[in-house]
Amino acid sequence: MIEINEQILKDINRNFIIPPKPEILTELQNLIATGDAPIADAAKVVVKDLAISSAILKIVNSPAYGLSRTVADIKQAVMFLGWDGINALVQGLKLKEMFATDNSCISLERFWDTSTEIANVNMMIGQRLKKQIAIEPLYTLGLFHDCGVPPMAIKYDNYLTALHCANQTDKETIIEIEERLYNTNHAVVGYYFANSWHLPKEICQLILSHHNAAILAEVTDTDEQICFAILKMSENLVTTVRRGSPISQWGIIESKVLDVLHFNNDEYCDLQEDVIDFLNNLS
């Protein structure tokens, strides 16, 4: 099984239009929701739509995956991608469709770019861990961890102000600011969206708690804690490279993140250099 790559998603987003048959996406969602449908059933649905079929072929034939031969058969391509990859692609397309008309106060294009960059950096970190952890969920977590932001931005005209406040202070987190202004927050909103899309329960829980630094209180080596620490490190690396400054509260959680991931400062610096090269190559 292979994982959706950020560069390929960017290619799809540039060339792939939401298909004229949205019922195909719904049909795939219904299969995903059953939890036990054979992957061959997904292939039978995908082949009915040229646009989705071509998107999946672009993914599996990306040079990033280094397959020894080109995959031309869409059913075989679906098998390569697997249910996790199909699910991530479908949910990404559905969310893009939902917010295709952007009247919000933030640039959703930049939001998507940042999400996919974090997803890929998640995987880069996962591959360097001394403890083995499943790589596949890390991409999904990076892509969807902030999925509550677009609906919040569309609903509240002054949401950009809340984001700016959070970026400029360590006294309040974005969650605290959102709760004060809106009596809800993007983690809760994202959790409900993720559940409605039938994302894995572990991913949904991490979306809900992705600003809860208490998860890092002591090293437990649980998958939840490791995934949380990976996400925080990825967010900080991407934000530092793209905006020139660390994420809010990084100074507070940095040592804990490194402890959880068993990284020393030299390893973190090496990773940062690789992330800089990776992101610069995307520009």
Image: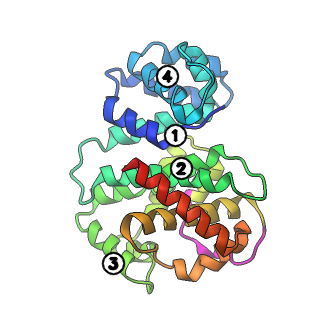
Indicate which disc, 2 or 3, sits on the residue closer to the N terminus: 2
Give, as a three-letter code, the residue at label 1. Asn
Q: Say whether marks 4 and 1 touch (CB < 8 Å).
A: no
Q: Nearer the viewer, mark 3 or mark 1?
A: 1
Circle 2 sits on which residue?
Answer: 120
Please determine whether, in this image, residue 157 is positioned above or below residue 77. Answer: below
Q: Quadrant of residue 177?
A: bottom left
Q: CA distance from mark 2 to mark 3?
A: 27 Å
Kindly identify the amino acid type of the residue bearing the numbered disc 3. Answer: Cys
Pointers 2 and 4 in contact (C-beta within 8 Å)? no
Residue lying at 39% horizontally and 42% vertically, measured from the top left:
95
Inspect the image, locate mark 4, and give the three-letter code of the amino acid beneath it: Leu
Q: Which residue is mark 3?
A: 165
Mark 2 vs mark 1, CA separation in Å: 7 Å
Q: CA distance from mark 2 to mark 4?
A: 20 Å
Q: Which residue is mark 4?
A: 57
- At mark 3, the secondary structure is helix
